[in-house]
Image: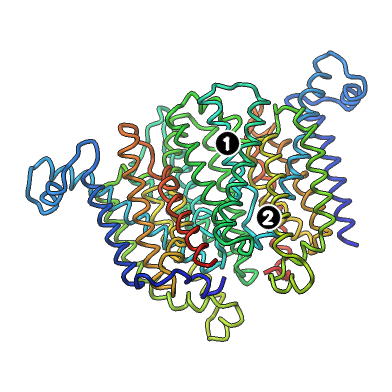
């Protein structure tokens, strides 16, 4: 796929303009996300509550219930989308995504082992649930490290990273299934919620931990953005520009792993966003890696916020995990821009 | 000819596994009894177990494993993407969605109706994905096909998930079908599925040189005199048919389609003349081995075959990856 074919959208609006539109979209979704729920608030009440004025009950609903949930969706969606973007560049594969390359499955296995080790006979946890994110992150990082270690021995060409990632991911997934059928039903349903991914139990402590992690990881990702442009060339040309290709690919893989681990430890295995948001950004924004990455961040956030909004409106009082409907929200939009891009090419 | 010896080795392995599959189960059946059940039939319990339980699942594992292995190879070749696999055409999700709709809203219980619905759902979904890809970029850009497929598959999987969350009773009923496997399936389906798969496989094998050309970039293939778009389309349709057949017989079975072609390649095959049969044989062997292992892991009940596919396939894959560390495939 050449640069010319991916930037084919007609310049009706400048790239910056399109990014601003995405920001506005995200803000609008966020305001809706704060206003809608089991009790509805009008826009002025939302704004008053945000400013710290207005009714006391509104303030409590906004600041202690809806805000952490909203921020969690924004941060997780953005982190997963950026991780997917980086992985697709690093492996040069359109299908690469956090959930494809074994990272998320490793996290899932970590959660299962945690639930297995620290549950007593009556299925109550013997340690605080606050440790669960740590278990997920360790699982994800361990599996990704194994992928890297195995691939490095063969010089770490992208195909090897992909194959090792898929293989270890399949193993982890098998482990998760075994734990689920072997364990009590209660544990299986707890795990199923994690596997679908949701943000409805977000706490402020989770949000701030995740924000701190992303405050380090996202700038790092943007630092290596220029190298991602070089990576788009074929390997020899990329090497000729002075880029240490294999090392860059490994660094990118590590970055994407950390981003994924941070996101899934708190929200669970939210799917689809990490795969599709980067492609949507490529089709909508186009151009060099930097604006595309920003677009992916915004689109990923918007997708997860919209999905969370949808489960609150459509399924209340049932708590359907937001991860179960990211595809319902994201797929029609993505197909639309995919088809539009096709028409422009023709 | 190392490839030839590999093929014969795999054939011998499959024969061995098939024999084991007839002997092993909750209870071991001695060879004499197996032979008697196969040749004479009979009404005693042993004969019934062999003839109505073990023979069907063995044949189904053989057919479906081979069909999925070939389908995966065709997809990986046509899209030039090592991550491509039959599920990506939305086939499993389409079949699953059709079955869920049928069971939830029409209350259908009959397995053969479910299989028919699965087949129709799978093919409709594949047609939808093809249609979307054609209007989004044409056969000229296989990555659009993958993206359209992934999107539709995710959409329908969400649909399945939502229905299941909303209706737990259905989940109990459908979990068996949705988890995929070779046991307790309707063997009559094979009467149609096996010959159809075999015909497609033979046709594809004849096209092997053209498939080799597809792996090069489009311009090179064209200059070799290969009508790229036409061949790619035919190959993708064949892959969709094979996957549709598999899912209607055995439900969605993952991993074989992805792993079997890679195992065949790591085994040393490069050209499609060797890759096509080797992918089929590897797929069948994987399916049989996993199906046998599934009987023992959580003895005496059956483990989901997907778990065992990973347990059998991944170590093999890792071993071959490490062994071929200096291989040219990059």
In this view, the residue in front, A328 or B267, is: A328
Q: Tell me, for residue B96, which label it has, or none.
A: 1
**At x 49% / y 63%, what residue is drawn?**
A341
The image shows residue B98, relative to residue B134, as above or below, that is above
In this view, the residue in front, B281 or A332, is: A332
Estimate the x, y position of residue A274 in percent, counting from the top left.
Answer: 45, 56
Q: Tell me, for residue B75, which label it has, or none.
A: 2
Q: In this rendering, would B213 be left or right of B308?
A: right
> Callout 2: residue from which chain?
B
| Crowding at mark 2 (Cα within 10 Å: few <14, some 14-19, many 20+) | many
The image shows residue B295, relative to residue A285, as above or below, that is above
Q: In this rendering, would B330 be left or right of B277?
A: left
> Callout 1: residue from which chain?
B
Q: In this rendering, would B252 be left or right of A207?
A: right
Q: Tell me, for residue A186, which label it has, or none.
A: none
Q: Residue furthest top?
A: B43
């Amino acid at each position: 796929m050449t640069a010319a074919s991916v930037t084919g959208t007609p310049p009706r609006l400048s790239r910056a303009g399109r990014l601003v539109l995405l920001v506005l979209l995200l803000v609008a979704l966020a305001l809706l996300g704060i206003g809608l729920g089991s009790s509805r608030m009008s826009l002025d009440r939302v704004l008053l509550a945000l400013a710290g004025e207005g009714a006391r009950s509104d303030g409590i609903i906004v600041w202690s219930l809806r805000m952490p949930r909203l921020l969690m969706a924004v941060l997780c969606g953005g982190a997963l989308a950026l991780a997917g973007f980086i992985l697709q560049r690093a492996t040069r594969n359109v299908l690469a995504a956090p959930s494809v390359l074994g990272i998320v499955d490793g996290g899932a296995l970590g959660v299962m082992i945690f639930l297995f080790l620290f549950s007593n006979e009556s299925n109550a946890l013997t340690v605080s649930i606050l440790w669960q994110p740590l278990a997920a992150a360790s699982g994800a990082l361990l599996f990704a490290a194994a992928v890297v270690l195995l691939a490095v021995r063969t010089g770490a060409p992208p195909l090897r990273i992909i194959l090792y990632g898929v293989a270890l991911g399949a193993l982890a997934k098998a482990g998760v299934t075994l734990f689920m059928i072997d364990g009590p039903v209660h544990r299986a349903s707890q795990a199923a919620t994690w596997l679908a991914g949701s943000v409805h139990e977000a706490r402020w402590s989770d949000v701030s931990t995740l924000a701190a992690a992303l405050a380090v990881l996202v700038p790092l990702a943007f630092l290596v953005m220029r190298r991602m442009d070089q990576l788009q060339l074929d390997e020899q040309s990329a090497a000729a520009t002075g880029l240490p290709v294999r090392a860059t690919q490994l660094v990118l893989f590590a970055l994407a792993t950390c981003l994924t681990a941070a996101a899934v430890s708190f929200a669970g295995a939210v799917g689809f966003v990490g795969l599709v948001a980067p492609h949507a950004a490529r089709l909508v924004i186009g151009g060099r890696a930097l604006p595309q990455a920003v677009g992916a961040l915004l689109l990923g956030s918007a997708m997860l916020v919209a999905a969370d909004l949808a489960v609150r409106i459509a399924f209340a009082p049932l708590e359907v995990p937001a991860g179960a409907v990211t595809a319902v929200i994201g797929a029609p939009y993505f197909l639309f821009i995919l088809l539009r891009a096709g028409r422009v090419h023709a | 000819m190392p490839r030839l010896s590999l093929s014969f080795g795999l054939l011998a392995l499959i024969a061995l596994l098939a024999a084991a599959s007839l002997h092993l189960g909750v209870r071991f059946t001695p060879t004499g009894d197996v032979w008697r059940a196969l040749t004479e039939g009979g009404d005693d319990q042993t004969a019934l177990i062999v003839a109505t339980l073990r023979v069907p699942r063995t044949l189904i594992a053989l057919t479906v494993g081979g069909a999925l292995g070939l389908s995966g190879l065709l997809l990986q070749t046509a899209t030039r993407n090592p991550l491509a696999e039959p599920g990506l055409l939305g086939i499993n999700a389409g079949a699953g969605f059709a079955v869920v709709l049928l069971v939830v809203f029409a209350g259908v219980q009959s397995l053969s109706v479910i299989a028919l619905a699965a087949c129709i759902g799978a093919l409709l979904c594949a047609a939808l994905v093809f249609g979307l890809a054609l209007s989004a970029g044409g056969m000229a850009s296989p990555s659009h096909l993958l993206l359209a497929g992934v999107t539709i598959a995710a959409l329908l999987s969400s649909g399945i998930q939502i229905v299941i969350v909303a209706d737990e009773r259905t989940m109990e009923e459908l979990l068996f079908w949705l988890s995929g496997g070779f046991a307790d399936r309707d063997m009559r389906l094979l009467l149609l599925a096996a010959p159809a798969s075999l015909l497609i496989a033979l046709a594809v094998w004849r096209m092997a040189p053209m498939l080799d050309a597809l792996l090069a970039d489009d311009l090179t293939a064209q200059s070799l005199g290969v009508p790229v778009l036409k061949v790619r389309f035919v190959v993708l349709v064949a892959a969709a048919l094979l996957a549709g057949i598999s899912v209607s017989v055995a439900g969605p079975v993952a991993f074989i389609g992805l792993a079997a072609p890679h195992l065949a390649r790591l085994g040393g095959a490069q050209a499609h003349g060797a890759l096509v049969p080797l992918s089929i044989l590897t797929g069948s062997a994987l399916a049989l081995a996993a199906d046998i292992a599934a009987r023992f892991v959580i003895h005496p009940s059956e483990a989901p075959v997907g778990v065992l596919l990973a347990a059998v396939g991944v170590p093999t894959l890792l071993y071959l990856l490490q062994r071929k560390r200096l291989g040219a495939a990059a």
